[in-house]
Structure formats: structure tokens, C-alpha cells
Image: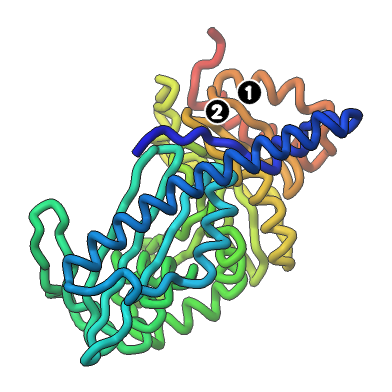
Amino acid sequence: MSKIEVINFEEKVRKMKRSSKVNGFSGMIKMLRHSVDVFEFVGEDVEERLQKYSNLVGKDSKDFMLNPTDMKDSWNSLSCGNPAIFNFMSKEVNKEKYHLRICYNPVAESVATSFSKLSNGLPVAQYDSENNIWISHTDPEISEKFAKILDSGSPEADILEFLLEYHNPTEKDYQRIKQKYQKLFSLYNKTNCYMEPVFIIPKFAKKEDDVILYLVPRDMFRHGFCVGMEKNQLVLMQELHMDELMLNGYFYDVNDNYRKIVGRTDNVNTMRNSLYRLANRYTDDDIFTIPVSLNRYVESNNVKSLVKRAARKGAELNDVEKKNLNSFCSFIKKNIDISY
């Protein structure tokens, strides 16, 4: 896949000189043309891959239908340099059909494809493109209800797919999880281009639906925050894992991961706006984005310089935000030598 220049469209437009209408329009036109070029390149590649897989099963590419929302979503995603996903489903013949999923990651310059065969709505085989063979599913049968969700290609399908990969919930378990995390499900619908679901089973878990759902940045290079739920509210948390402290070559005796709530809200759109500022930006290098409230954050590609930058940033923050920032800095100072 040839290199795709990453452009955050909305950020670029926001930074244009408002005093110059000519520069503003020419800059916008340039970025729109860039987005069209990227989308045209991706579109041609998608058509080639679709033709390849349709030929594989003796079908015409016209027999496959693209999920209607994928076209608009992929345009928005690629325009911002974010991953884009295309889901194609073939027409059903003798209760059999095929699902082709193509995922583009312009930052990593990679393309991932998944081609599966379904019978009566359930996946029965996966195509191994490296060995050119079909691999039959040997996993326990998925219920008809789960299969329908997975086939939809919706954000909910991502959550269920992740859950089924690591756990074995019944339909009742899943309904309890979905009801418990209804606001997180709704939030993921609005942020799935740059956030992804993670399920954790706590040590005290006694049954399959005793899992904890979080949303974390989809960008593997972005660290420092996640979103969960507490008392039916969405909560934004500072978060740092032990292994993330090794990114800059610093690692001391850290006994546990760090997590602290810095903002909470009942409103899904309020949290969506916060995550848009924090996560809808991709980078080629590791970066620490540490929120201090729903509206403000401190950011650096190095935890050492982040603490020093936090000292300068503190003058702009209110008392609660300063307290949240000091909590994070105290954790860093306790576990990392930043004196040099």
C-alpha cells in the first residue's frame, strides 16, 4: 500500500488564517482534493479486492452489497487520517452467503481483510488467504441473535465480537451487559472511528456478565486515558499501565496500573465531545494525553517533559483540574526519576 499523507481536516481548517479568505478557500480546496485522491486510491483498491474474493467463490462483484453507512463513515475517517472499514455481504443463495470485511489503516499503511462463509446466518468457515484454504469453524455454535448482530457490521458488532473472543456469555448475560453499559454502547456508536472496546474480568467475578467495559483509544500510540461507567454515569479517567512507562526508557518499581476519574457526565454527547478532542488525532510516535477534566488535558511524547510542562500549564487550570494534574504528576515522580 503506497504511503498516505495523514491530514486532520477539521484541525487544519480551524487553524487557517481567518483574515485571508483566499488562503482559507485555497487551503480548504487543497485538503478536499487530497481527501478525494486518498478516497479514489482506496476505492480502486477495494474494487480489486472485492473482485478477487468474488471470483474465488464463483460470484460477480455486483452480487456483493456494501453496508450503506460505510461509505460516508469511511470518507470522514480517511479525511482525518483515521482507519476506515468496508463491509460487503453477498446475496443469499440456498441459505448461504459471504461476508468480506476490508479495514484500511492509513497511519500504519496497512490493509486487513477477512472473508467468511455463512450458512443460515451463522459463520461456518473462514478463508485463509496465506494458504489459500477454507478453515471450518470448530468453535461452539453462535446463537442466531448473536449471528445477526455480528453480520450487521455495526459498532455493536465490534463490542460483541470482542466479548465473544475472550468470554462465553449467554444471550441473557449479554443483555445484562448491554443494559448495564447502555451509555457506553451509545458512546461507542459515536466514537468508534477513534475508540475501541475492552472487557476486563475482575478477580472477584462470579459469573460471565461480571465483566467491566471500557473504551480506550484505537490509536495504539496514544496513552493516558479511558472511559468507563460508575453509578450509571460516564466517567473519564486518567490511565497509565506499567508497561507504558517503559516507552521512554523509564521503568521503576510500579506495583499497579494508575487510574483516576477526572470527569463524569450523564450526557453521551458531552463525553463524545471530550473524546473527540483527546482521541481523534493520530500520530506516528507514542504520545501521552492526560485529561484533567472533561474539557482540558496536558500532552507530551515524553513523561519526563510532560511533568515539566504540567508545571507551566497549571496556571491556566482551575483548582479541581490542578488537583487532578498533581495526582498524575505525583504518580510519575514516585515511579520515575525525572531529575535529569
| Residue 195 x %, y % | 52, 54
Find disc 1 in the rendering and name its residue.
307
Above or below: residue 194 compared with residue 144: above
User: Residue farthest to the top?
Assistant: 340
What residue is rendered at 83% in x and 38% in y?
319
The span from disc 2 to disc 1 (Cα, nearest Å) is 8 Å
Q: Earlier in the sequence, mark 2 or mark 1?
A: 1
Query: Could you say which is closer to the camera, residue 285 or residue 253?
Result: 285
209 displayed left or right of 135: right
Residue at disc 2, secondary structure? helix
User: Residue farthest to the right?
Assistant: 19
What residue is rendered at 72% in x and 38% in y?
28
| Residue 267 x %, y % | 74, 66
Q: For residue 227, which numbered disc appears in the image?
A: none
Above or below: residue 324 compared with residue 191: above
| Residue 227 x %, y % | 58, 56
Residue type indicated by callout 1: Val
Query: Could you say which is closer to the camera, residue 192 or residue 127?
Result: 127
Find disc 2 in the rendering and name its residue.
332
Above or below: residue 241 compared with residue 309: below
Quadrant location, the N terminus: top left
